[in-house]
Image (spheres, grey):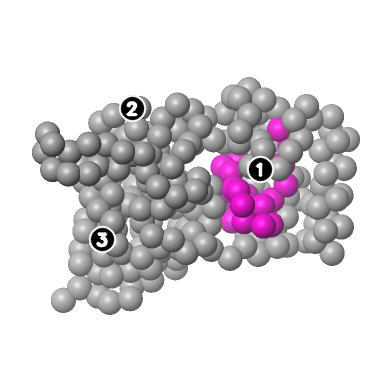
Amino acid sequence: MIRTVIVFCVMLCLVWNTADSSTIGEAKSLSDGSQVCVIGSVTLLEPAECYIESANRSSGIWVQADMTGFAMGDLVTATGTLGTADGERAIQSATVAAAGGQAAIAPLGMRNAWLGGFATAGGACLRDYFGAGIAGVWRAAAGAPNAGLLVRTTGTVNAVYYSPITDAHWFYIDDGSGVVSDYGDKGIIVYSSADVHQGDQVTVTGVSSAETSLDDAGRLVRTIRPRSAEDVRIVRASE
C-alpha cells in the first residue's frame, strides 16, 4: 500500500512539472532557489510549518507552508523553493498536498554529540569545543547529518528559560557529551514548555534541528523541537 502511494506521489511531482523532483536527501543537496518536490510523512506539525521525513528515515526537511487540515503521520508531497533559513535547509513558500494514507515514523535514538551531524548546507557547520580556555579548539561535530529527522535523546536538565517577549520556553540538556551552545552554555537546546526543573533526568523525542549561534554567525548550535510537551519524559526528578 505504501509503495503504491509513493509511486502516486512521484507521478504528482511529474505532473506539476517540478524541475528538481527528488528524494528529500537529494533535494537538500541542491542549491538555494531550486524548485523541488519531495515525499514524506509529517513528523512535526504547526499551523504554518511542518517537518516531513522519508519512509526509510534517511532524511527529513523543514517545510514552510499552510498546514491547515493535515495531521501527524500524514503522507504528503511538498513542492516549493529550496532555501536556507537560520542555517537549516527548508522548502519555502511550499504547497503541501495529501498523498493519501499515513506512515508513522519511529524516532532514531542517539547521543547528544551526534545530534545534527558533521555537515550542514549553507556554509555554517556544527562544531564542538575541546579543551579549556584559550588552549581549547573548535572541531567539526561527529555523526551522520540528521537535521530534520525525528530523534530521541537523553540528558540532565542544566538550565530552564522563558522569554515573555516571544513567549518561548526552552531548556538545556546534557548527557555527558558536553556539547557547547551559545555563549559557552553547555548542552542541547530543547524548545518545549514541558514542566522540567534543573537537575531532572529526561528523555526527549523531537525533530533534530539547528540554528545560527547568537555569538558566532558562522556556527550552528543543536536544537530539538519536540512535537508536544508529552515528548519530554522525566526519568528521574531532581531532589
Tell me where residue 89 sits by quadrant: top right
Percent x, y for residue 15?
A: 88, 35
Magenta run includes residue 117:
no
Tell me where residue 5 sits by quadrant: bottom right
What kind of element bears circle 2?
A: loop
Q: Which residues are magenta?
A: 36-64
The residues bearing labels 1 and 2 have C-alpha atoms spaced at a distance of: 26 Å
The residues bearing labels 2 and 3 have C-alpha atoms spaced at a distance of: 26 Å
Q: Is residue 232 above or below residue 217?
A: below
Residue where numbered disc 2 is placed: 217
Percent x, y for residue 186?
A: 23, 50
The residues bearing labels 1 and 3 have C-alpha atoms spaced at a distance of: 32 Å
Q: What's the residue type where badge 1 is placed?
A: Ile
Camera-side residue of 1 and 102 = 1
Q: Is residue 83 above or below residue 111?
A: above
Residue where numbered disc 1 is placed: 24
What kind of element bears circle 1?
A: helix
Q: What's the residue type where badge 2 is placed?
A: Ala
Whether residue 195 can be seen here:
no
Residue where numbered disc 3 is placed: 176
Percent x, y for residue 60?
A: 59, 48
Q: Is residue 43 above or below residue 60?
A: below
Q: Earlier in the sequence, mark 1 or mark 3?
A: 1
Q: Label 1: few (<14), some or many (≥20) within 10 Å?
A: many
For the N terminus, give its image quadrant: bottom right
Q: Earlier in the sequence, mark 1 or mark 2?
A: 1
